[in-house]
Amino acid sequence: MNADIPNNVDLDHDQQLRRALATWHPRFLQWWNEVGPDGFDTSTVYLRTAISASADGWANYAYVRMPEYRWGIFLAPPENRKIGFGDNPDADPWQQVPGEFRKELRRIIVTQGDTEPASVEQQRHLGRTAPSLYDLRNLFQVNVEEARHLWAMVYLLHRFFGRDGREEADELLTRRSGHRDHPRILTAFNAPIRDWLDFYCFAMFTDRDGKYQLESLSESGFDPLSRTTRFMLTEEAHHMFVGETGVQRVVQRTAELMKQSGRADLHALGGIELAVIQKYINLWYSESLDLFGAEDSSNAATYFAAGIKGRYREHTANVYREHRALEGEYELRLPGGAGERIPLRRAMNAILRDAYVQDCERGLARWNRELAARALEQRLALPHAGFNRKVGAYAGESCDPRGNVLAAEEFAVRRGEWLPTEEDRARNAELMQPVYEPGKIAGWIAPPAKGINGQPPDFEYVILS
Ligand code: BYC
């Protein structure tokens, strides 16, 4: 079995890792069969597989049956670097887990690892309503790669954390998204992804949290974590592309229909109304903001001091002049206009989130160009940071998307103006009938601008059977 696992971690000569994987691998396959993509086991899918960490090895395209996908273990090449931030910025990165930070590292790796299978579980049923074979293939690409990211974290647990690492790796296959008794760890990974607009928004906003978390871990003082996450980021870019262009194509189609008809109520014309798209953005953006944790966080301060987790591109972006962050404060704006000053090290979650928000704004600007290009006045917007929050300083406040604080009762009454209702979802479900013919596309979304790996528009990305 190990011969089938592409890797650059010398698996052939690592007996302990081989033994741990020999037990875990069949459990992983069982998990995939139980809660992975539903109904496409025998279809062949045009997928990319990483077979080495080199530039020409990480994206090999071929037709594959998903249960036979070769999930591998890769580290990005070593770099000559220092830890670079926290209490000991000039120290060499650790090749083994330092005893004093074992608990923190294990927790971060488990939290990261938990999100990967969770997202596969959340997206399990989407294949049945795909708008095209192109989108179906992208969904499955995302699914197999999130599962590979689970492997990446399991490698770290098996290789560096001994017995409790093996137990944690098993637990990653036991928790279930949305389960009442054994839920996934972070909130957004227990929220249902019921349709394709959920999926595109999730890939845009929630996968983008992944990018920011992975970027900060890619400069971690624990070198194997840094190298693992650097390799994951190469794959993650495609997931955000799927999300950002997915929403863009929905907005494009909506804008075309609005322009042609002069109407905003598009359902009877087969389109998704802009107001509904806005509600999905409100939902997934606010869910994703929660993933950064509290703005004032002693955990984040500990991670930073230890050199485990820094800010976004602590070094590579040349944004930060100083990497100890012992002085200075972060000013948090609260709903209603009040402010709170947080010592810099304790504000690392908020600082990382700010970089994320800017990135999301860029995506929104691109979507709005679809409206502007058709001389439509309407615009999409990100809701205020206080809207629909369950974690951090805004939790417990009832804010509208503009940041006005409301009485809880008023929020409850008006909720359906801002978040998808059952009626919105039922109408989307009506529109989202599967389209499985090569080159064809559902009426509620525009076709992609180009094919995967240079393939023509009518390429058969998934051969159904
Ligand atoms: N839900 O100091 P606090 C991805 C807990 S996405 C539930 O505020 P901290 C992907 C927290 O655990 C990236 N609980 O937060 C995307 C703590 O619990 P305890 C995933 C939450 O610890 C799409 C308490 O509240 N990677 O890769 O500084 C598809 C107070 O904690 C939440 C990571 O997150 C929440 N949202 O930071 C596939 C990186 N937020 O100690 C994949 C690893 C906080 O009281 N994780 N809590 O029991 C971390 O670095 C940190 O754990 C967090 C939170 C950023 C999540």
Image (spheres, rainbow, N blue to C red):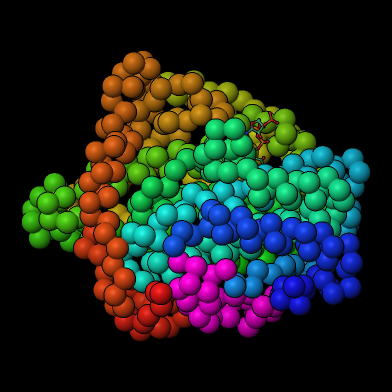
Q: Residue drawn at (74%, 42%), measured in percent from left and top?
A: 107
Q: Residue drawn at (45%, 21%), measured in percent from left and top?
A: 397
Image quarter where the N terminus lies is bottom right
Q: Nearer the viewer, residue 100 or 363?
A: 100
Residue at the outermost left position: 261
Residue 394 in the image, given as x and y percentages of width and height: 50, 26
Magenta residues? 40-67
Q: Vertically, is 283 above or below 65? A: above
Residue 46 in the image, given as x and y percentages of width and height: 48, 77
Inspect the magenta stretch and tell me whether residue 366 lies in it: no
Q: Residue drawn at (50%, 68%), measured in percent from left and top?
A: 41
Q: Which of 6 and 239 is in front in this view?
A: 6
Name the image quarter holding residue 103. Answer: top right
Q: Nearer the viewer, residue 97 or 12?
A: 12
Residue at the outermost right position: 99
Q: Vertically, is 77 above or below 388? A: below
Which image quarter has ligand 1?
A: top right
Would residue 211 be seen by someone viewing this image from the given angle?
Answer: no
Q: Residue drawn at (67%, 31%), measured in percent from left and top?
A: 297
